Image: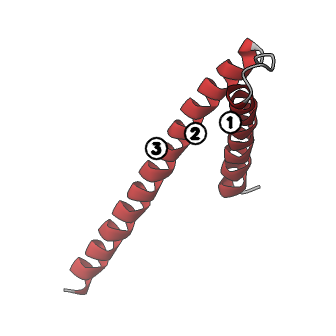
Amino acid sequence: MSKNIWATLVFLSVALTFAGSSVLIGAHLAAPSSPPPPAGVYIAAFASSLMLAALVVAARRSRERMLKTQVDNAAQRKLAER
């Protein structure tokens, strides 16, 4: 499998964990009379939000590195033409 497929699978699993835990927390906040979710739900929401932030930063750095490589290659080709 390519790197993009693995990154997508990791992102989806983290995003689904965050969405599910957010729904459980939101349901409790909407109906305070309902029993609160287990502590693990709060931990999962916090951990998955940190993972989402890390994935966004990693994707941004990867894109910046790719753009820098493209610019460097274009500059080298331009110098080679002269």
* Amino acid residing under circle 2: Leu
Vertically, is 8 above or below 39? below
Query: Could you say which quadrant of the image residue 47 lies in?
Result: top right
Residue 41: give its label: none
Instruction: Name the quadrant of the C terminus.
Output: bottom left
Q: Which residue is farthest bottom?
A: 81
Separation of disc 2 and disc 3 at Cα? 9 Å
Q: Is residue 70 left or right of residue 48?
A: left
Q: Is residue 24 above or below residue 42?
A: below
Residue farthest along the left direction in this orientation: 82
Residue 21, x across and y down, in percent: 72, 31
Q: Which residue is mark 1?
A: 18
Where residue 65 sits, quadrant-wise, is bottom left
Q: Residue at x 67, y 45 (%)?
A: 11
Q: Amino acid at mark 3?
A: Val
- All told, the count of numbered labels is 3
Which residue is disc 2 drawn over? 52
> Which residue appears at 31% of the width and 66% of the height?
72
Q: Name the residue at 28% across, 73% down.
A: 76
Residues tagged 2 and 1 counted as in contact (Cβ below 8 A): yes
- Please give left or right for residue 3 compared with residue 13 in the image: left
